[in-house]
Image (cartoon, rainbow, N blue to C red):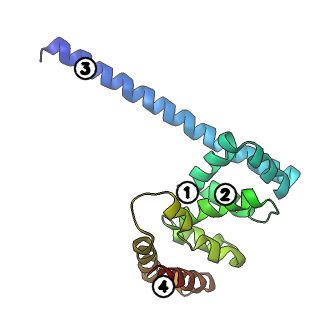
């Protein structure tokens, strides 16, 4: 490859990297704006109004919030947990699913924040199995159980005990 061709190739790669970086920065700023907007709505209008809004703005609001929650973004986790106290079954299901998926990534951060009444819901792998990742539910349950057991402080809390019992029951039911 000649120097000129290599130089054009390097410039093209740099431009693609810069464009991707700018796109990522814009997406992150948009995500932060979404959480800030929803938190503002929550303080002004309440849980049910925000969940109604999310249900009508599924693609542009609910799905991005769910993805941020699944990635264990702290502000999204706190907001999603706050939105669990709702009569909106559709929103409740979406929030529960994203929190369940987050439990596979950050149980230490998530579990202490979840209301005890929702621990059994987030300590499930139903949504994980619905994703069709190719990984089996029993293997994921075993992984999550081992992870929680290794976090002894968390496993010994009331939420940890309930979560482990829920995971173990689900594993027995699948075997």
Q: Earlier in the sequence, mark 2 or mark 4?
A: 2
Q: Is residue 50 above or below residue 163?
A: above
N-terminal of the pair, mark 4 or mark 3, is: 3
Alpha-carbon span between mark 1 and mark 4: 26 Å
Image quarter (top left, top right, bottom left or bottom right) of the N terminus: top left
Q: Kindly identify the residue that appears in the image at 57 percent across and 55 percent down.
A: 73
Circle 1 residue: 70
Q: Left or right: 78 with respect to 132?
A: right
User: Could you classify mark 4 by the number of other residues whose Cα lies within 10 Å: few (under 14), some (14-19), or many (20 or more)?
Assistant: few
The mark that comes first in sequence, 2 or 1, is 1
Q: Which mark is residue 9?
A: 3
The numbered mark, 3 or 1, whose residue comes first in the sequence reads 3
SS under mark 4 = helix
Q: Nearer the viewer, mark 3 or mark 2?
A: 2
Disc count in the image?
Answer: 4
Give the SS element for disc 3: helix
Viewer-side label of 1, 4: 4
Residue at x-position 25% and y-position 15%: 8
Query: Residue at left 76%, top 61%?
Result: 89
Residue farthest to the right? 45
Label 2 or label 4, whichever lies nearer to me, is 4
Label 3, label 2: how far apart the Cα atoms are: 44 Å
């Amino acid at each position: 490859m000649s120097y000129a061709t290599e130089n054009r190739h390097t410039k093209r790669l740099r431009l693609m990297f810069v464009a991707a970086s700018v796109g990522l920065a814009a997406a992150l700023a948009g995500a932060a704006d979404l959480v800030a907007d929803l938190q503002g709505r929550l303080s002004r209008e309440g849980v049910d109004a925000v969940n109604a809004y999310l249900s009508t703005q599924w693609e542009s609001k609910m799905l991005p919030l769910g993805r941020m929650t699944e990635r264990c973004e702290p502000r999204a986790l706190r907001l999603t947990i706050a939105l669990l106290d709702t009569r909106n079954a559709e929103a409740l299901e979406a929030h529960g699913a994203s929190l369940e998926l987050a439990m596979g990534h950050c149980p230490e951060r998530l579990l202490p924040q979840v209301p005890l009444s929702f621990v059994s819901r987030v300590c499930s792998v139903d949504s994980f199995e619905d994703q069709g990742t190719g990984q089996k539910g029993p293997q994921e349950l075993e992984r999550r159980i081992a992870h929680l057991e290794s976090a002894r402080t968390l496993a010994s809390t009331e939420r940890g005990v309930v979560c482990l019992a829920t995971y173990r029951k689900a594993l027995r039911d699948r075997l």
